[in-house]
Amino acid sequence: MTTTSPPPPRTRNKGRLFDWKLLIGVAVVGVLLVFSLFTGVYDIFGADDGGEMFAITRIPRTIALVLAGAAMAMSGLVMQLLTQNRFVEPTTTGTTEWAGLGLLTVMILLPGASITTRMVGAVLAAFIGTMVFFLFLRQVTLRSSLIVPIVGIMLGAVVSAVSTFIALQTDMLQNLGVWFAGSFTSVLRGQYEMLWIVAFVAVAVFFVADRFTVAGLGEEISTNVGLNYNRVILLGTGLIAVATGVVTVVVGNLPFLGLIVPNVVSMFRGDDLRGNLPWVCLLGIGIVTVCDLIGRTIIMPFEVPVSLILGVVGAVVFIFLLLRQRRRG
């Protein structure tokens, strides 16, 4: 995809897909999810309708944490593999901004649109935006891998500016801010079920993981081994667009999650997509849950959007990765 030569894949720790370390990780994340279920201002034990509120708000919110965290982390992993660049993910390539533009367009053209219609608009726009980014990388010669996320951020900023202008002209600027807040506050029973779509996306990624791994070696090698490179890129783009569009509609923007998780997992386990996928999903869920718990408790009874905490953590990790890349030449 880029003209810079990709580093040789690191394949250490390619043991069994499920081992005792992964089971420990599942147990730790499970404890965090239990804390999520019982953290909040509303007294679910003392109130008369505590059980009903628990089913309406706490359970859907915790399920949304699991699905959104896994989806965005997985999207970052696939995107980094296909672009041969460790610094890209949906929020550094403009994919999230394109999804927001699609959502805004649907709401302007169809004010009473259902969540399914809004989701379709966001997915289509995210797909178009991701393809524009991929086509740009294929046409432009870039000497440094660090330039790729900068280009993506610039494209995302342009799309975001267009969305802001349209929202300002149509008196929907406040709605746009709410959509991009990246908060689980509004996740309720009956409004989050579309997130289950990303579970099917994760299954699809697992089954085509080997093809994505080969495609990550470049078009020439992929073609030589008999792989239809363009078809795999199209499939990967579609899966990324679906995951990003659904999460954007239901939850909002979760910045840098797809950047942090795949890089951390890759440092310890190498670049085997199929073997890393459970770890990437698990770590994505854990990070989102921790950030959400911090957001719910730091200024209780009010909440801080999870995107704010993720943005701070992600920016620090992004700088660390840049410095690490520079030291390694």
Image (cartoon, rainbow, N blue to C red):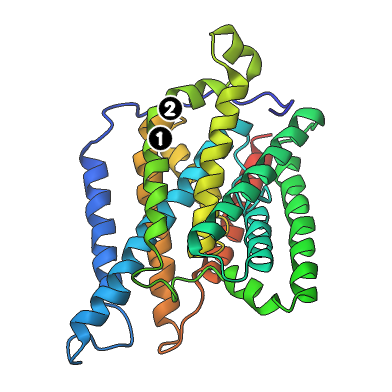
> What is the quadrant of residue 130 in the picture?
top right
Q: Position of residue 314 (x, y in %)?
A: 56, 58
Q: Position of residue 229 (x, y in %)?
A: 60, 20
Q: Are marks 2 and 1 in contact (CB under 8 Å)?
A: yes
Q: Position of residue 139 (x, y in %)?
A: 80, 29
Residue at figure coordinates x 62%, y 61% from the top left = 103
Residue at figure coordinates x 68%, y 27% from the top left = 1
Left or right: where does residue 152 sit relative to residue 124? right
Which mark identifies residue 225? none
> What is the quadrant of residue 83 in the picture?
top right
**Relative to the observer, which residue lies in front, 52 or 288?**
52
Residue behind mark 2: 208
219 in relation to 178, above or below: above
> What is the quadrant of residue 233 in the picture?
top right
Residue at figure coordinates x 67%, y 47% from the top left = 93
Graded by Cα atoms within 10 Å as few (under 14), some (14 to 19) or many (20 or more), the crowding at tag 1 reads some
Going by the numbered disc 1, the residue's amino acid type is: Ala
Residue behind mark 1: 204
Graded by Cα atoms within 10 Å as few (under 14), some (14 to 19) or many (20 or more), the crowding at tag 2 reads some
The furthest residue to the bottom:
47
Left or right: where does residue 83 sit relative to residue 148? left
Q: Which quarter shows the C terminus?
A: top right
**Relative to the observer, which residue lies in front, 167 or 30?**
167
Determine whether the residue tagged by mark 1 lies in a helix, strand or loop. Answer: helix
105 in relation to 281, above or below: below
Going by the numbered disc 2, the residue's amino acid type is: Val
135 in relation to 245, above or below: above
